Image (cartoon, coloured by chain):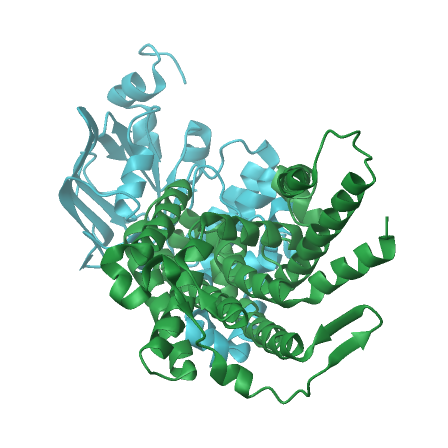
């Protein structure tokens, strides 16, 4: 269910189309591995406060683009801005502090930390996180506030009963939920989810979709990589299709589903056949 | 075989000077390896730098207390120099670089080029008189029955276990702070920590430097006890002893290095006593002689360490729940 304002309905359905209120602007970002052009995105803008799906066949460069934008990899060329601030050459941890947090395709729970500790690690502005601050700083009242916030968030994600357990003892689905809840502790404006629904049962997929919609309702911008077209149709405001490193199409989900280029590149089906 | 004597000797070793020194050294390594996940195979280098820093300062006419400060500063600088190029590498590369750095430093210290300062392979002696002059304990033997120590040993033991207590308190404060939680998060997954806005490199550098400074304290303490530093004391084997102690006690546990060191030295002396007795009583049908005891003891230790890594990687006192997570 795309958002009711639907500010994107009037836009042209061409790759690289400018958005009315972009939070993330990507210009000519290129990354090659040897002779392979992994990412070559001429222009891409992400509208603030929407859910944008990034789809494309395996090897299209979706995760590489995520890595580049969040500072986990460096492009040979290119420029990108978050909220008007340049992010070129900014290390990954500073990208996170500036308000763009990513999750990983293979869930990275901090196994030998408890679920609550996983949440507290992510909390911002804890003076006790510096060496001297940890030894002599007054961090306990900050910790208490963070703990209250973390518990509220865990409750929302249905993990509050697991708070004192090691994260390594969680099920796969619970780890997905924890990773999402943990990313939110950083208070990001943009949250980048790399295949949050991969390997998750249908019931949990619905739960995760509910959480992702709720993020948009809270005013956050969500960019997520997904393979399942049904999921993409259900939740996205806008869909960007990547193939062989370039954006080949973008538009509202209904438009993308009927786009022949996309069907050729991504779905690999013959024309006229329903995906 | 005199079992009582063997047990008493082993008990003396468990609370003795080397046990305190290895506990201290292992506390530093535990911060790096147990809490932060840094595979530092050159821990002995910080022990050497600490010991030599102090010895050279005294040799040049400085006071021993100034020497302690010099030793700690040198270890911090060593951590900085070693950390900046290596901490961006993956864990196994860090291990290779640190073991090489430790050896380079040892060979440098024993070289004729450095002889004017380090006195080459002969090393430096008698630099801790200031400490022994302060000994308030009257001459005599202290303890019960055969479990006794002379006044010099008691004085060194007070220093050693006192240092262990103070450093453990420091570690308690540090590892229970948000800083400690962050380094554990880095141990679990660097990328996750980066994605949550943590300056992973900075934390690893701090951990390497602080762990090195604690290692330097251990090196100085050993040197004070022996009143002697020679380069060939600081061979990589010392690092691996420290790893053994950390693993016995459980990596990432606060008291692990202390219990680990006590168990290490107890077993070390106990095996020595039993093997000696066994050879004397000809229990091995003449297969082994007294000179074989040392190597056999090491072999048994190696087997024990393997057993520990396979069945109890969380250490003898680590939690069962934590071990199950490791297996996943």
Q: Report the side of B171 relative to B6 (left or right).
A: left
Q: Does the image show residue B94? A: yes
Q: Nearest the camera: A60 or B203? A: B203
Rendering coords of residue B91 (x, y %):
41, 44
Q: Which residue corresponds to the image point at 41% horizontal and 41% vertical from the top-left?
A: B92
Q: Nearest the camera: A224 or B36? A: B36
Is B78 located above or below residue A224 in the figure? below
Q: Which residue corresponds to the image point at 47% horizontal and 59% vertical from the top-left?
A: B183
Q: Nearest the camera: B235 or B208? A: B235
Rendering coords of residue A170 (x, y %):
63, 44
Q: Which residue corresponds to the image point at 31% horizontal and 19% vertical from the top-left?
A: A263
Q: Give the quarter of the figure containing the C terminus of chain B.
A: top right
Badge count? 0
Q: Does the image show residue B198? A: no
Name which quarter of the figure residue B126 lies in: bottom left
Q: Report the side of B214 relative to B269 (left or right).
A: left
- For chain B, what colour was chosen? green
Name which quarter of the figure residue A113 lies in: bottom right
Rendering coords of residue A16 (x, y %):
17, 38
Q: Nearest the camera: B310 or A195? A: B310
In the figure, the cyan chain has which letter? Answer: A
Rendering coords of residue B153 (x, y %):
64, 74
Q: Report the side of A266 relative to B222 (left or right).
A: left
Q: Which residue corresponds to the image point at 54% horizontal and 37% vertical from the top-left?
A: A205
């Amino acid at each position: 269910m795309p958002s009711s304002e639907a500010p994107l309905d009037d836009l042209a359905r061409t790759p690289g189309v400018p958005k009315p209120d972009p939070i993330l602007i990507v210009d000519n970002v290129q990354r090659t591995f040897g002779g392979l052009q992994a990412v070559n995105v001429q222009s891409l803008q992400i509208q603030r406060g929407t859910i944008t799906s990034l789809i494309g066949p395996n090897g299209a460069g979706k995760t590489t683009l995520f890595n580049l934008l969040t500072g986990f990899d460096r492009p040979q060329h290119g420029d990108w801005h978050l909220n008007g601030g340049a992010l070129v050459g900014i290390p990954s941890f500073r990208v996170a502090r500036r308000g763009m947090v990513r999750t990983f395709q293979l869930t990275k729970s901090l196994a030998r930390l408890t679920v609550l500790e996983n949440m507290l690690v992510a909390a911002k502005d804890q003076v006790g996180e510096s060496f001297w601050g940890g030894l002599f700083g007054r961090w306990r009242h900050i910790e208490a506030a963070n703990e209250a916030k973390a518990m509220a968030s865990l409750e929302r994600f249905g993990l509050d009963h697991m708070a004192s357990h090691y994260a390594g003892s969680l099920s796969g689905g619970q780890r997905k939920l924890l990773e999402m809840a943990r990313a939110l502790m950083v208070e990001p404006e943009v949250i980048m989810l790399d295949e949050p629904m991969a390997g998750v049962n249908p019931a949990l997929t619905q739960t995760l979709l509910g959480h992702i919609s709720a993020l948009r309702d809270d005013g956050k911008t969500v960019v997520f990589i997904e393979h399942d077209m049904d999921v993409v149709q259900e939740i996205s405001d806008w869909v960007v299709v990547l193939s062989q490193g370039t954006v080949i199409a973008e538009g509202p989900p209904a438009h993308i589903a009927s786009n022949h280029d996309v069907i050729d590149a991504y779905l690999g089906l013959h024309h006229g056949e329903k995906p | 075989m005199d079992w009582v004597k063997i047990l008493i000797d082993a008990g003396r070793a468990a609370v003795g000077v080397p046990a305190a020194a290895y506990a201290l050294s292992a506390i530093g390594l535990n911060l790096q390896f147990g809490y932060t996940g840094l595979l530092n195979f050159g821990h002995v280098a910080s022990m050497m730098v600490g010991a030599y820093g102090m010895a050279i300062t005294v040799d040049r006419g400085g006071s021993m207390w100034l020497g302690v400060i010099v030793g700690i500063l040198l270890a911090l600088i060593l951590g900085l120099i070693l950390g900046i190029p290596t901490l961006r590498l993956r864990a196994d590369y860090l291990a290779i670089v640190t073991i090489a750095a430790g050896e380079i430093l040892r060979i440098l210290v024993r070289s004729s080029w450095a002889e004017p300062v380090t006195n080459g392979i002969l090393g430096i002696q008698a630099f801790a008189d200031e400490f022994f002059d302060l000994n308030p304990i009257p001459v005599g033997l202290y303890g019960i029955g055969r479990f006794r120590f002379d006044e010099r040993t008691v004085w060194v033991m007070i220093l050693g276990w006192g240092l262990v207590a103070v450093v453990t308190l420091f570690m308690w404060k540090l590892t229970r702070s948000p800083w400690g939680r962050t380094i554990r998060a880095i141990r679990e997954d660097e990328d996750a920590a980066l994605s949550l806005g943590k300056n992973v490199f900075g934390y690893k550098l701090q951990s390497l430097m602080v762990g090195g400074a604690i290692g330097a304290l251990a090196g100085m303490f050993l040197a004070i006890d022996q009143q002697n530093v020679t380069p060939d004391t600081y061979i990589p084997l010392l690092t691996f002893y420290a790893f053994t102690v950390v693993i016995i006690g459980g990596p990432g546990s606060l008291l692990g290095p202390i219990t680990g060191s006590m168990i290490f030295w107890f077993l070390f002396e106990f095996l020595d006593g039993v093997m000696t007795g066994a050879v004397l009583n000809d229990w091995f049908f003449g297969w082994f002689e007294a000179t074989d005891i040392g190597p056999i003891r090491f072999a048994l230790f190696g087997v024990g360490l393997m057993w520990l890594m396979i069945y109890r990687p969380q250490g003898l006192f680590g939690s069962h729940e934590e071990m199950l997570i490791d297996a996943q």
